[in-house]
Image (cartoon, coloured by chain):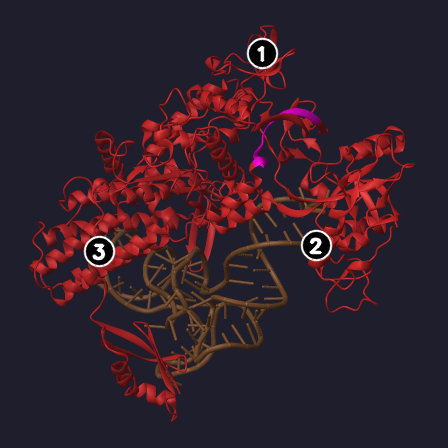
Amino acid sequence: MTTERYNPKDVEPRWRQAWDQQELYRTRNDDPRPKYYVLEMFPYPSGRVHMGHVRNYTMGDVVARYKRARGFNVLHPMGWDAFGLPAENAARDNKVNPRDWTYANIASMKGQLKSMGLSLDWSREIATCDASYYRHQQAMFLDFWKAGLVERKSAKVNWDPVDMTVLANEQVIDGKGWRSGAEVEQRDLTQWFFKITRFSQELLDGLDGLERWPDKVKLMQRNWIGRSEGLMLRWALTAQSAPDGFTELEIYTTRPDTLFGASFMAVAPDHPLARAAAASNPALADFCEMCRRMGTSAAEIETAEKLGFDTGVRAVHPLDPEWTLPVYVANFILMDYGTGAIFGCPSGDQRDLDFARKYALPVIPVVMPADADAATFAIADTAFTDDGVMINSRFLDGMKSDVAFEAVTQRLEMAMSGGRPVAQRKVNFRLRDWLISRQRYWGCPIPVIHCDDCGAVPVPRHQLPVELPSDVSFDRPGNPLDHHPAWKHCDCPQCGKPARRETDTMDTFVDSSWYFARFTDPANESAPTTLSAVDGPSGWLPVHQYIGGVEHAILHLLYSRFFARAMKATGHLNTVEEPFEGLFTQGMVVHETYRDVSGAFVLPSDVRIDVSGPNRNAVHVETGAAIEIGPIEKMSKSKKNVVDPDEIIASYGADTARWFVLSDSPPDRDVIWTEDGVQGASRFVQRLWRLVNEIAVLAGPSLEKPAVFDEAALGLRRVTHKSLQSVETDLERLAFNRCVAHVYTLANQISKSIDAMTTDQPDADMRFALREAGQILVQMVAPMMPHLGEECWRALGCEGMVASAAWPSTDAALLVDDTITLPVQVNGKKRADVTVPADANNATIEASVRGLETVIRALEGRDIRKIIIVPRRIVNVVG
RNA sequence: GCGGGCGUGGCGAAACGGUAGACGCAGCGGACUCAAAAUCCGCCGUAGCAAUACGUGUCGGUUCGAGUCCGACCGCCCGCACCA
């Protein structure tokens, strides 16, 4: 029998058209079946789909197709995270309009995604740069503002004085703007913030309920939120040393137990006390200015020396009025954590110790390990930061750290000064409010008008959206909105006087913080969400399975959790606070790197690998020049180790690409793209096609289930149903690599069963078993390789399309064998096998084990002390 | 520095505390072919003719039994990073 080669170029477009014609993936909100919402993180429309997208969207598509087969009403939408800087860069560099550039990219990427055969509901497509989307974002901004969740306040930011824009930390290299090369300044600017810190505790507590999130991501968010319990503590300043208007200094500490080890106070360069002291002290003012200029890059902060300057101000120890300590300005104190001021305990904090050694301040050990000797315990170069036993601490001596914490805290809470307690317990968070202002053009305009009389005024609802002007030029540095007079100047909505629009746009992370909610009813023109569709009994949220890269572990995933709470508070969600019930973070696609003799990177498509035995040698396809094979790294344009999905789909078909990215590597780990691997995947596509056609001929049309099956047919049926069950389990766990293995196992078994047949016209029981195996094999494959699935489904003569077929059910009777073979261990080492009926009791098993020749030999004459039988697993003879 | 994860054949990997290496890739041998490709069959942790012994980074522990649990160490990866 000959079967034509499977040709994905013909087959794949045909089935995509058939799915489209039947609107198979169009989701209705009023469908009565149980809902399942699967979502992959939407892409930035950079212009080209890359292999990371292929892997991400294939995984989501497998889940969507599987859940559809299991009878769910599945929502699987796609959209575009379409605002952002690359569009502005392209506009400036290529003289194109950011909008035109973005929509052209969307069009080409949409075509690429469609060629992958994803079961997406394109009727719900949204682009965040579309006014039909961001008008609702502007409305929600105003709602958040009204609800007290928005604040305009001064913040310290990286300012590039040449490009005249704020820079993100990672865009500051060696203290200079990455593009202009200008020295970056720390500037206080008035900016818009979302008050995410309002929900610090809730965002922390909510993590406990996220059972289907990776622990790693939850941990990263916990650390980011950074809760700490401590004490706000007021220190009096001596009257003769304090600047005018200052009588005390309030600090935050998590270690009040170490208070008797204090040897100095330190405040941030921008602390009000530092500014006041600097006013009459030019040298101090210079020092503070120098601190402000300090680099903001991670490397600089890490290596920066601890520097301080004695203000001359003296503070009084709260537990000893006779004890005064110097107040320094220090470069390592952060103004925006705690109160921007600390007490330094050198023996218990490494930074304080470094500082004390530099400025010859006392180092008093106050905590020592429980087994140390108080008489000899001393601090050298390393502070003792653990809990332990108190020493040199008066009434605390001998207490453990936590007991001392309570003792000091209670005493200080009782102590009064100026009619108020000296100390108060305080929970502090590391989390900062979310700065959303960007001095960029290609973003969602902040819907605010500034009036000299009325201040910041919301744009009236009926004037929304505040649309971006399209006639902008990027000839001048800075924000084009800022020098677009017709757009910028307007009248105050309150008093009618001439006023100015806010020219900052929103951080693009705002756009992606609620798109998953918009997908539930993207056509609603009057409101961001439709309450009957967005969540609650008849709604979609939370997203049941969210899939994306781990790089968003904090940013996007934390912002979205904030947004859900803020949307609930402003009536845009009914009940949901956690937007993503299940989260899966997939690994990257990595590839070997290639360099020519000059060290320049070379594309994989320009390299040919010659294999001789264990050696692999690479040469340039055209020139034949030697190529050096480098380390395997994340696919990136700069290293040129990229493989274009379009080329793979053109030469092998989408199914091969999909099958490959699901195979071998666990989905949360990196997958190595290799030409061999792709060819292996492609070979399996062809093999499956041949196998299915063979089955179709041998099995014939479907027939009634025979009453009895011979051993061969029964064996095939057992493997079929066991494979099906394994695939179900592993699909639920998103263990796609294991699903692939189960598919191979079943395909191998079918081939073996066919090889073992003695006739081309098998009996009814084998025909039934073959057809059953073939159909189940195709249904197992179809979520992963949907085009091939359809073609095979038709080759088997099945009704309709496999994409709309119900998932087959397993026959429980076939999942257990009649007889089982148990390994027999003697003292933990495997010595034999024993085959017994599946329902054999322990006595029967013991009896057969005792008689085994190999067991007796392995015992070497010892008596059997006991026999451990783990049901259906193993027998261990202890002798 | 703090926090977390991971170390299994030539490679990607499997393995409710229960037969280590399923499944795939590469490789080797064979069949078919004038030949090649494709396909099919077989082998494929190490040593050994074999029986067998040894093998999951290292060292210890718990257990009838450890890749899996506990402790220490070595190595790699990731996240945060002057957070008081």
* Marks 1 & 3 on one chain: yes
Q: Quadrant of residue A433?
A: top right
The kind of residue tagged 2 is Glu
User: What residue is disc 3 on?
Assistant: A810
How packed mark 3 is, by other alpha carbons closer than 10 Å (few <14, some 14-19, many 20 or more), is some
Magenta segment main secondary structure? strand
Q: Position of residue A193 (x, y in %)?
A: 60, 28
The kind of residue tagged 1 is Lys
Q: Which of pointers 1 and 3 lies earlier in the amino acid sequence? A: 1
Q: Position of residue A135 (x, y in %)?
A: 46, 20
In this rendering, position of residue A418 left or right of residue A603? right
The brown one among the chains is: B
Q: Which chain is disc 3 placed on? A: A
User: What residue is disc 1 on?
Assistant: A488
* Magenta region, residue range: A188-198
In this rendering, position of residue A561 left or right of residue A416? left
**Placement of A71 over or under A93, stated as above or below:** below
Q: Nearer the viewer, residue A422 or A384?
A: A422
| Label 2 element class | helix
**Placement of A817 over or under A482, stated as above or below:** below
The kind of residue tagged 3 is Thr
